[in-house]
Amino acid sequence: MNLRRDVFQAISDPTRRAILLLVASQSMTAGAIASNFDTARPTVSKHLQILTECELLEQAQEGREVYYFINAKKMKEVADFIEPFRNMWDERFNKLETVMSKYKKKK
Amino acid sequence: MERKTKIAAEDGKQDLVITREFELPVELLFRAYVEPEIVEEWMGTKVIKLENIRHGSYQFITTDPMGNKHGFNGTIHEFDMNERITRTFEMENSPFAVQLEFLEFKKQTDDTSKLTMHVVYKSVALRDQMLRLPFAHGINMAHNRLQEITNKLK
């Protein structure tokens, strides 16, 4: 199976988004992450694997434990890609708001 | 400036949702979509036709900074005053297929309102291409600027 291992695939899943939110505040072990979900441990492991393959998460060995932490640079890439599209609409709607405020005063 | 517009675009889907809260009563927000002169003002386009009725249609022509004219058109499928517009949207002479737009206008308070725009594209690839358009445009602009600067250096 040729799965697309890119960041957009990674963030399409709600559990994976929840994992990212969780790990964003502090680095955590797989066990600590899994304890936050009702999902079976292997399922969480699979999500962690995908997030790691997509480079959204990074691993660091500390003694016997493996800690997961956010790859901030990669996260920014995801945000940046859609940002120009959002800016375009935001500017358009700002214009609408400004134009219509004029009519509000006239009323 | 605060960015009030939100985009929800899940991977692998052929639609996206744009939401925006306005410091405007819902009636004024809706008017911005209905009155041709107002549409022209905020969208920076020329309104050729705008029939705000079920089975009606609209046609806009926009002139870009290079002087090229771009036509847009669509058909109105639902029109409920201050509540909803369902319409198609098509960029003429472009590789992009027609898209379906569900616009919902909601009153928040007497002075605020919310617009939810659900856009459905022909395919996932097409949606992603549309999403990337302003991104690609930004890169092109930067590239052209670079070209200008390097030309000057020649």
Image (cartoon, coloured by chain):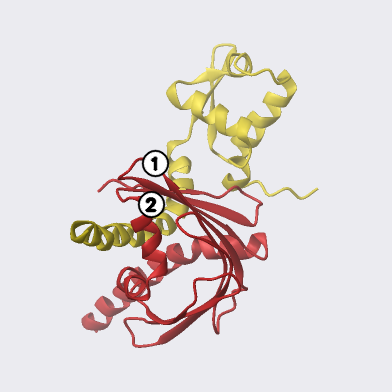
Image point 53% across, 37% down: which residue? A56
Q: Amino acid at mark 2?
A: Val
Asked if marks 2 and 1 touch (Cβ < 8 Å), the reply is: yes
Give the side of residue B130 with respect to residue B123, left or right. Answer: left
Badge count: 2
**Which residue is more in the foreground, B16 or A16?**
B16
Image point 45% across, 56% down: which residue? B82
Instruction: Kindly tell me whether residue A74 is visible in this rendering.
Output: yes
Image point 43% across, 44% down: which residue? A76
Q: Is residue B45 above or below residue A36?
A: below
Identify the image quadrant of residue A85.
Answer: bottom left
Q: Which mark is residue B108?
A: 1
In the picture, which chain is yellow? A
Image point 68% across, 25% down: which residue? A45
Q: Is residue A43 above or below residue A9?
A: above
Q: CA distance from mark 2 to mark 1?
A: 8 Å
Q: Where residue B152 sits: x, y (%)?
A: 22, 82
Q: Secondary structure at mark 2?
A: helix
Q: Where residue A44 sits: x, y (%)?
A: 68, 24
Residue, disc 2? B26
Q: Amino acid at mark 1?
A: Gln
Q: Where residue B101 sits: x, y (%)?
A: 56, 62
Chain at numbered mark 2: B
Instruction: Kindly tell me whether residue B139 is visible in this rendering.
Output: no
Mark found first going from the N terminus, 2 or 1:
2
Q: Which mark is residue B44?
A: none
Q: Where residue B64 sits: x, y (%)?
A: 36, 81
Chain B visual colour: red
Q: Secondary structure at mark 1?
A: loop
Chain at numbered mark 1: B
